[in-house]
Image: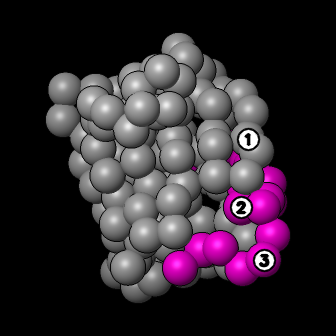
Amino acid sequence: MLLEGSSDIVRHIERSVINAQQIEILHLSNSTVLVIGEKSLALYKDSRSISDPLGNGLIQLVNIENFSFDIDHPVVLEHRAGYVGLAREQVLLILPNAVKLFRSKSDALQGANSICTLPLE
């Protein structure tokens, strides 16, 4: 469970290149990291685990069908509590048990039409 008494779930964001792939890394309040790739979302136990060639430290991974992030440009534009505003008006909601991706703020507010769900447990 991610909520630990603070409403600031995302501590900081960085961009990096791993295995010739541009990624965006969201460092979360519980020391895990959420990685946004071009067609995937992944949760790792810590930032060192991202580059582990054996995948040790990978908690969850979801490949996103029929969708891609424009990872050549910053993806995350804003974040507040469990809300993460993305480029192209997309939204990630970080909930206690999952991360959900939506095409729009309206869909996120209604909890409807999610593109994918990344379980956190």
In this figure, what is the number of numbered marks? 3
Q: Residue extending furthest front?
A: 110
In the image, what residue occupies the spot 72% across and 79% down? 4
Q: Position of residue 81 (x, y in %)?
A: 73, 52
Q: Amino acid at mark 3?
A: Gly
Alpha-carbon distance for marks 2 and 1? 9 Å
Q: Which residue is mark 1?
A: 79
| Image mark for residue 9 | 2
Tag in front: 3 or 1: 3
Q: Position of residue 5 (x, y in %)?
A: 78, 77
77 and 57: which one is in front?
A: 77
Q: Amino acid at mark 1?
A: His
Alpha-carbon distance for marks 3 and 2? 10 Å
In the displayed structure, does residue 61 sit left or right of residue 20?
Answer: left
Extent of the magenta region: 1-21
Task: Tell me if label 2 and label 1 are in contact, CB under 8 Å.
Answer: yes
Mark 3 falls on what kind of element? loop
> In the rendered structure, does residue 121 fall within the stretch colored magenta?
no
Q: Please rate how many residues cluster around mark 2, counting C-alpha atoms within 10 Å: few if below 14, some from 14 to 19, many from 20.
A: many
Mark 2 falls on what kind of element? loop
| Image mark for residue 5 | 3
Q: Residue extending furthest left?
A: 65
